[in-house]
Image (spheres, grey):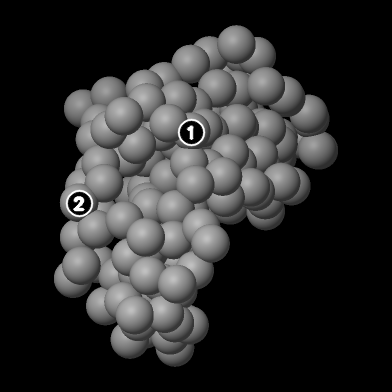
Amino acid sequence: MTPPKYFEDFTIGDAFESRGRTVTEADIRMFIGATGADHPNHTDAEYCRHHPIFRQPCAPGVLALSVVDGFIAEEITRKCALVLNYGHDRIRYLRPVYPGDTLRAKIRVTGRDEKNADWGVLTIEADAENQNGELVLVNVNKLLIQRKGSRWSGGPR
């Protein structure tokens, strides 16, 4: 078992590439069912046929962001002692994500700030592309990560 990572184990410039994840019609329907985000952009094919941007119903942007959050969890947070999502500073949805699109993300550590003796804040930039290499989402995310020597005993594992 790999020892957990702490704030001090990350440096600016650390980079990760996610695996691919195909967004399905079922993902979109389940997300809409869980959130009530049933705008015609996501549910009405006829509406989308007449829309200047969409060619068919697409995934809600926050569903695509959730996929990227999963990539960040897989590459970083699941490997940490204690960690919390501290917030998103910037999110842009650049292209629609349609059922059948496969997303991948390039994830980089772009900032490190010591918060106090127990916690540090990492700034993470994650850019998601579809299977055609088109940028669909950019995200600047903050992670609150336990520091080595903090008063906490390594996390709830």
Q: Position of residue 13 (x, y in %)?
A: 60, 11
Q: Nearer the viewer, residue 39 or 20?
A: 39
> Which residue is found at the position 20% from the left and 51% from the top?
100
Q: Nearer the viewer, residue 152 or 73?
A: 73
Residue type (three-letter) at the residue carrying disc 1: Leu
- Secondary structure at numbered mark 2: loop
Q: Nearer the viewer, residue 125 or 146?
A: 125
- Secondary structure at numbered mark 1: strand
Q: Position of residue 75 (x, y in %)?
A: 37, 31
Q: Position of residue 33 (x, y in %)?
A: 33, 86
Quarter of the picture containing the N terminus is top left
Q: Which mark is residue 57?
A: none
Q: Position of residue 102 (x, y in %)?
A: 25, 41
Asked whether the viewer can see residue 85, the reply is yes
Please say if 47 is above or below 75: below
Q: Which residue has dot 2 on it? A: 100
Q: Is residue 21 left or right of residue 117?
A: left
Q: Which residue has dot 1 on it? A: 135
Please say if 9 is above or below 82: above
Q: Residues within 10 Å of mark 2 (few under 14, many from 20)?
A: few
Asked whether the viewer can see residue 151, the reply is no
| Residue that sits furthest to the front in the current view | 50
In space, the residues marked 1 and 2 are separated at their CA atoms by 16 Å
